[in-house]
Every structure is written in structure tokens, then in C-alpha cells.
Amino acid sequence: MLPGLEPAELPADAVEVGRIHDAWGVKGWFKVLPHSASPEALFSSRRWYLQPSERAAKPAFSGTVLLRIREAKDHSDAVVASAHDIDDRSAAEALKGARIFVPRSSFPSTADDEYYWVDLIGLAVVNREGVALGHVRDLMSTGPQTVLVVAYEEDGKALERMIPFVAAYVDQVDLPGRKITVDWQADY
């Protein structure tokens, strides 16, 4: 196993936040491709949990390992980071493709009316009249706004509806109650 990596249990609240793309420079830094346009979770956590890429032919490690981060910062179109005991380019290259997880509990706090997408996945969606519209399966960024992808079933067929995640249509997000109330009709 590479120096700087230690076997670890994946935390129960772990969320995949990115992937190690490649080595960056000659001093052990590596380039990260975050899954989010706002990668604050990568910056806020100094303990990243790695799992090998499912496509890696010969991964440098197996199972889940802990990587202690020294520094992570924005750089151009990506994030670059350095870790304790990853001191040269070849050690950084060995991490290529690794999936990065951080505990949800280490994410920065959100402001009122701000939500992490991961917290919205699986929430029930109902309209003002109490009609169940389905469950949030995914979210999608369309540029100017985010859209809820709501999965539901009709006549035994799996379907989905798209609801803009904007104040004009979203009345309330109740995270503890696992429900989003919207101004939307089932036949839209």
C-alpha cells in the first residue's frame, strides 16, 4: 500500500464528492475533478476516504483508505490538493481514478433556503393539495436554475417529471420530515 494511505471504514454518512484525475506538478500534488460546481466539501474536510476506481486495471490500493489532506484549493477548472506522505509525482499518479468520499457531517453549514443536493435525494414531493407527485431521484443544473427530477409510477410504468427548484414552485423543504411541498399539478 502507498505511504500516506491507511485502511479505514467508510463513514455511514459518506458522500462521493469527486475523483482524483491525475498528478499535478512534481511535489505530490494531485488534480481533483469535483462532482459539484461548488466543491466546499472538499475544502472543509481534511480526511478524505478513497476507494479505487471501478475501471482501474491495477489499483494502488483496495477497499477503503483514509487520506489525510494537507491542503486543497481551487485552481483553474479543477481543485488541486496535497496530502501527508504523498511527496512525489509517482505517489500522486498512483491515486489516479480514486473516488473521493467525505462525511456529510463535515460539509459546511448552509444558509437558510440553501440545500445540498445529496440532502434532497429521496425526499417525497407533494403539491399544495397534498397529492403525492413522487420522490426526488436526481437534480439537474440547467444553467439558470436547478431542476428536481421526480420519479413516480403510473399504471405500473416508471416515469419522471421535472420541477424547477425555484421559489415560484417550491413552497417548503422539510428535511426532518423528508418532504418538499410544491405548487405543481400531477398533470403538468
Image (cartoon, rainbow, N blue to C red):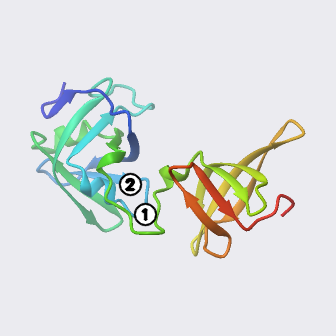
Report crowding for label 2: few under 14, some 14 to 19, many 20 or more residues within 10 A (C-alpha). many
Tag 2's secondary structure? Answer: strand
Q: Which residue is mark 2?
A: 34
Mark 2 touches mark 1? (CB < 8 Å): yes
Residue 187 quadrant: bottom right
Q: Is residue 20 visible?
A: no
Seen in the picture, residue 165 relative to 177 is either above or below; the reply is below
Residue 105 marker: none
At horizontal 36% and vertical 40% (from top left) the residue drawn is 97
Q: Is residue 176 visible?
A: yes
Tally of numbered discs:
2
- Residue toward you, 57 or 9: 9
At horizontal 49% and vertical 51% (from top left) the residue drawn is 119
Seen in the picture, residue 113 relative to 125 is either above or below; the reply is below
Q: Which residue is mark 1?
A: 37
Horizontal side, residue 109 vs residue 71: left or right? right
Report crowding for label 1: few under 14, some 14 to 19, many 20 or more residues within 10 A (C-alpha). few
- Residue toward you, 166 or 80: 166
Indicate the position of residue 14 as horizontal and vertical percent values. 37, 39
Horizontal side, residue 128 vs residue 81: left or right? right
- Residue toward you, 77 or 149: 149
Q: Amino acid at mark 2?
A: Pro
